[in-house]
Amino acid sequence: MTEYQVDHWIGGATVPGSGEGLPLRNPATGLRIGTVARADGGVVDRAVAAAAEAQRDWAATSLARRTEILFRMRDLVVQHSDELARTISREHGKTVPDALGEVGRGRETLDFVCGINHAAKGEFTVDASTGVDVHSLRQPLGVVAGITPFNFPAMVPFWMHPVAIATGNAFLLKPSERDPSASNLVAELYREAGLPDGVFNVVHGDKEAVDAILKHPGIAAVSFVGSTPIARYVQQTAIAHGKRVQALGGANNHAVVMPDADPSFAAEQLAAAAFGSAGQRCMAVTTAVAVGAAADPLVQELRTRAEAVVVGPGDDPGTDMGPVITDDARRRVVDYVTAAVDAGAVPVVDGRDVVVEGHEKGYFVGPTVLDRVTTDMGAYCDEVFGPLLAVLRVDTFEEALDLVNSSPFGNGSAIFTASGEHARRFTLGVTAGMVGVNVPIPVPVAYYSFGGWKDSLFGDHHAHGPEAVRFYTRAKVVTTRWPHQEDRVAASMSFPSTTH
């Protein structure tokens, strides 16, 4: 196909980059398909200026008008879901049905913010003291930014910008340079929906653009999703420059399988959770903890499920799992598998040598199941971010819970069981922000909030839902008196009390 250029979107129009752009490749072929503009500090300045100018009027726009635009935006996303999905599949490599699912889950946040008039309500107390009323309200921060990863080029930004915009902010998005086009398409849909120019802006690039955002004095808050080391860097840098930060980091999500679980059902769910999107999900299940007698039948069922996965280009209707994002990512997954096998792990299904006919230069790794993995192996300790499922064996529920809780990550965790007792003990005792019971990927619906514990989250607020409304606004409390002449209260030099 003809190579294309992905430009910035600032103030309602495309803005070309300056200097040499970044290469854009199709992971299924390994071929270059385009060039991505690269933002420097000057481009970020221009975007922040456009956003700041637009935000003043947008913050004064009625909730009725805002929700009218958001309803229209939701309809446009529905109409353009297939276009968004195919754009994502081309640049990311995931299958079109998987990309459609991503768009649908992102659209849930638009559903939520179409009711922002309810979510943004304040409180009012009459006669907190004699003739004195108190009310609270939440106001927008101003210009806010989002820095988002390659693995969900539509859904993760949708966790951010609809809430930020609905609450009266202007938004600056820096998507991954590996699959940037979906963000520009969303910008065009916002314009078609009637969003004023400058309220939503997109700048592309690499670390230079990220650092310019983190340090820019005109940006009040930064949302981030990515690896734990970068999340920590984002938080520290942005806080040092006076910003509110919400930084979601990495994960190694465990699923405990009890002996009373149906091994066929558990394996089916775990295989989908481990190998969907080639394992490139922060909520992918990377570790199955098999308890006692659950282990052998589970491993056998996992072998059957993994061997049945069809690997190929994401736009092929027969493909179950596409490539990983880059050749470096492919080599990293292969190296983790090799090191684990050399250290004693048993390769139940080995995807290191998978080659897709006609796509020999694509970045493919097959589904891989390793049994008898130990906690000192990199395939367990590190976030591999590929189609690798590690099986660890323990004897008891207590050992399983301790193993899960010993991980430095705490994004999501799951248990497969028929026991209400074990399910309850697990959900209350596990140190993770999101928990599934017979649900392998417990990503909450958008009217709840998404976020982990421990090294999976830096900052106080989770993403989307009510937590995001609080993150993108600040509270104000107003105390009011309208005295009549005959009941005026004399001023006092003592600290004011509400007992009068």
Image (cartoon, helix red, strand yellow):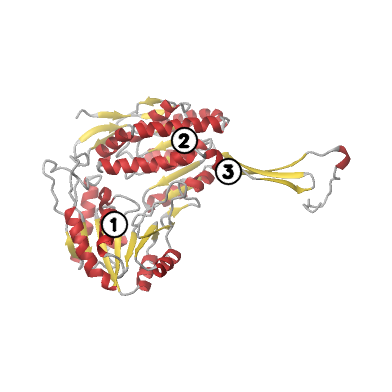
Element marked by disc 2: strand
Circle 3 packing at 10 Å, graded few (<14), some (14-19), many (20+), is: few
- Please tell me whether residue 455 is drawn above or below residue 62 in the rendered image: below
Quadrant of residue 305 in the image? bottom left
Q: Residue at label 3?
A: 474
- The CA span between labels 1 and 2 is 37 Å
If you read the primary sequence from the N terminus, does the residue marked by circle 1 or circle 2 appear first? 2
- The furthest residue to the left: 357
The quarter of the rendered structure image containing the N terminus is top left
Residue 324, can we see it? yes
If you read the primary sequence from the N terminus, does the residue marked by circle 2 or circle 3 appear first? 2
* Residue 470 as seen in the image, left or right of residue 253: right
Q: Residue at label 2?
A: 171
Q: Residue at label 1?
A: 269
Element marked by disc 1: helix
Give the x, y percent position of residue 459: 48, 52
Quadrant of residue 487 in the image? top right
Give the x, y percent position of residue 314: 22, 41
Please give the label number shown on residue 150: none
Q: Nearer the viewer, residue 117 or 36?
A: 117
- Residue at 85%, 45% in the rendered image: 489
* Residue 84 as seen in the image, left or right of residue 314: right
